[in-house]
Structures are given as structure tokens and as C-alpha cells.
Amino acid sequence: MRVQHLQPDASAAQVAAVLASDGAVVVDQLVATETMDRARAELQPYLEATPPGIDEFSGFNTRRTGALVARSETCRELVTHPLVLETTGAVLSGSTRFQLHLTQVIALAPGAVAQQIHRDQWAFDFFPFPSGYEVQCNTIWAMTDFTEENGATRIVPGSNRLADKLSFRLEDTVPAEMAKGSVLLYTGSVYHGGGENRSNATRYAVNITYNRSWLRQEENQYLSVPREVARELPADLLRLMGYALGAYALGYIDDVRDPIAAVRPELARPGFGDIDLAAATAKSQP
């Protein structure tokens, strides 16, 4: 079984349907190659300054550069891509809202070994979420072509429907090969891992993920994005970053203030939120 590919004009419903069945799908060339080149140019000083990983899982020959909202205007476009956000809303339905979970460029250098096959949702202290209940929707944008030789992400298609804490061999996976400008969407429950880079060039990817807003973010957006930068960001992006109530009465600041008041007080909304709407949304969970 291979990773399914969809055309860039695919609907969010189509993308979400494949994610429900397979746990992963590639949307081919969703943005122009020039978009990825622009993002890389904006981030180049940070990419060069990022140290490699310090253990096998993070990768001794892998560099992970974060804080992309603060550092790259182009990456803000990727974070807020309409197809990705609409798909994420479908995958994570049943919650009041979802939020930005992490942003990073993953630079897989020649000689990098294959990563352990895992579920991204294990970051939540290995909590055993109910089967079929997704807490994350993730993307990996191809900043360079993804091939099996240069370490394309390895996927176990359909493993989103399997039991938790299973072990897989590399032979159980397939590579998510895709052209530059394409995006791999995958759920937090699908088993996957970075491939081995047997080529002579670094494979670059932009990893942007989203989670239900009642869970902690993997990358702390409030500290990753300086306040002086946050003050200049659009309201929708700020709320996506977490400057919003995650659910009814969840995440307010001091005297029951909207968190967005910390950077854009003119946008603040009063109170704990809409408890009736929150309850109705929760009841709609599958």
C-alpha cells in the first residue's frame, strides 16, 4: 500500500476522508516551488545556526529550526493555508477550537539514519487516546523534493486505526515521496518516521502541526514569538497561536481577560466564552 496523492484542487472533505482511512495523504504541489525557496531564504541564517540533534530520535545528523512564525513571513502563509486549516477543522471536529502545535524546519543531512517509527501524539506523555479520536493534524511541506533516497518520511498507511504502542520495522513502511511545494498531511495517530538520507544533499522540510486547544502545545508559541513581533501579527494568526480561550474558561489571563489582550487589547472579548456552544460542540464528538 502506498501513500495516496491528491491534486492541489482537492477539497478539505476529500483530504480529511483519506486521513480518516489511511492516516496520511500527499497533496501535490499545493504551493509554488518559489514559495518554498522564499521561506528557505528568509530562514537561512537560523538554519545555519541551528545545532544538530543530541540523541538518536532527534537525529545526530538532523537540524530542527523552530520559531517559524517569528522568523518567516512566508511560513506564516503556510501556517494559515486555507486547505490545511479547513482539513484540520474536520479532523479535529468536536472541540471548541484547535491551535498551532509546533513549527520547525527539519534539515536531514546526508548520512542521517532512519528515525524510530512512532506516533506524534506520544508527545502527550504517552497518554492512550481512544482509537479513532484524533488530537493532532500535521503537515510536512517539501522544501526540497522528497525521495526514498534522501529520507522521505516513512508511513505505515492505515496504522491510525491500530492499537497504541506497537513496534514496526522499516520494511513495514512506505516512503511519502513528493515534489517540492507538495505537502504531506498526517494524523497524530499514524505510525511514521523520518527516512534514511542516502543521498549527497540535505533534505529540507517545513513541519507545521496543529492540536486540540485543550492540550499543551509542543512548541511554546508565546515564548518562541517575541511580544513585539506578536503585536504586528493578524488577529486570526494570533488566535491560532493560542492567544484565545482554548475552550470554555480555559486559558484566560488574570482578571478573566481574553489572552489576546496581552498583545492586542483592542481585540479582546469579555468573559469565559460561550458555555452552551462549548457543550454542544463537545456532544458532537464522534
Image (spheres, rainbow, N blue to C red):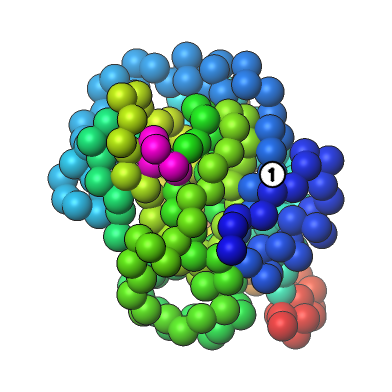
Of the 4 image quadrants, the one containing the N terminus is: bottom right
Q: Quadrant of residue 17?
A: bottom right
Q: Is residue 117 above or below residue 108?
A: below
Nearer to me, 89 or 228: 89
Left or right placement of residue 184 versus residue 235 in this view:
left
**Magenta span contains residue 43:** no
Amino acid type, callout 1: Val
At mark 1, the secondary structure is strand
Give the x, y percent position of residue 208: 52, 44
Task: Tell me which segment is drawn in magenta.
Answer: 148-152
* x 62%, y 16%: residue: 34
What type of secondary structure mainly makes up the magenta span?
loop
Give the x, y percent position of residue 149: 39, 38
Nearer to me, 211 or 138: 138
Q: Quadrant of residue 278?
A: bottom right
Give the x, y percent position of residue 213: 57, 63
For the question of whether residue 74 can be seen, the reply is yes
* x 16%, y 45%: residue: 54
For the question of whether residue 236 can be seen, the reply is no
Q: Is residue 276 above or below residue 29?
A: below
Residue at the outermost left position: 54
Give the x, y percent position of residue 272: 66, 67
User: Which residue does the numbered mark 1 point to in the structure image?
Assistant: 27
* x 29%, y 20%: residue: 48
Of the 4 image quadrants, the one containing the C terminus is: bottom right
